[in-house]
Amino acid sequence: MGGTYLLATLLYIVSFLSLWSLCYRAEVQTRLAGNVFANIVDGFRYIRRRRLILATLSITALNNLFVFSYATMVTPIAQGTLSLSEALNGIVVVCEGAGSFLGAHIVAATARHAQFARIYFYGSCMSGVGALILAGAGSFWSSAAAMLIAGAGTGCFALMQSTLLVLKADPATRSRVMGALSVAISSGPLGTLQIGVLAQWLGPQPAILVSAVLGLGLLAATSVLWPELRRRLG
């Protein structure tokens, strides 16, 4: 474990140095700070009037509540249900990161602006499909394939999540929109809690099945409520 954390730390240092070399000059805006609570209320009012921003934040919350929670069940399934070794369990977990890496890079290299919302929505659905496959996995290969698919979807989701918000939010309110994004992401611990309760009651794979079906159903409902998610961006 020590070597694993050392390698992770070195990779974070490489990432930090790569980001440090980027040149960006932020536009300086002079505006009165105003009342903090009034700014928060104004931010939520602004978000409510921007349909795609509201849809993006809703998808983020739903994914963290019902879809991404599958990750906490990977080891119980791999070492418990499937009786895989620690090494094979590690490979299954790595497949998620590999899928995310490949998916994000393919999208970054090929996607056009008009497709961003679609990639965000369908990437979220792909993560749910990967979770469903994991719920029925009976071998190392099927679980690894499930994690690759889920990871690819997560990569598309993660790449477009902030991109859509930055593109669609006015510069003056962008910081408040990104703050709302942090609130939506913070639903993740609740997702971990609910799938833990389900796993204790039903078992790891049935828990993923229930959570993923709920997540995909709510994602579908969200796309009906905000069809902008399935349309080309203007």
Image (cartoon, grey):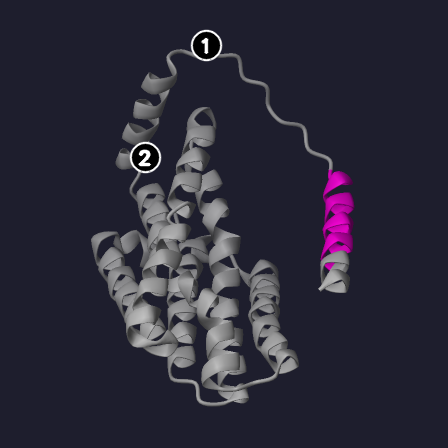
In the image, is residue 230 above or below residue 203?
Answer: above
Q: Main secondary structure of the magenta part?
A: helix
- Total labels: the figure holds 2
Please tell me which of labels 2 and 1 falls first in the chain: 1
Where is residue 182 drawn, in percent x and y?
A: 44, 40
**Residue at horizontal 57 percent and vertical 62 percent from the top:** 104
Where is residue 149 drawn, in percent x and y?
A: 49, 74
The magenta span reads 8-22
Where is residue 7 drawn, in percent x and y?
A: 76, 60
> Seen in the image, is 80 located left or right of residue 101?
left
Is residue 200 inside the magenta stretch?
no
User: Amino acid under label 1?
Assistant: Leu
- Looking at this view, is 102 or 202 the one in front? 202
Question: Would you name the residue on which mark 1 appears?
Answer: 32
**Residue at horizontal 35 percent and vertical 64 percent from the top:** 195
Question: Would you name the residue on which mark 2 appears?
Answer: 47
User: In this view of the protein, can residue 118 be seen by the observer?
Assistant: yes
In this view, the residue farthest toward the front is 200
Mark linked to residue 147: none
In the image, is residue 72 above or below residue 51?
Answer: below
In the image, is residue 6 above or below residue 58?
Answer: below
Query: Is disc 1 placed on a helix, strand or loop?
Result: loop
- Looking at this view, is 42 or 51 the one in front? 42
Bin the neighbour count of mark 1 within 10 Å (Cα to Cα): few under 14, some 14-19, many 20 and up: few
Where is residue 114 drawn, in percent x and y?
A: 44, 54
In the image, is residue 162 above or below residue 210?
Answer: above
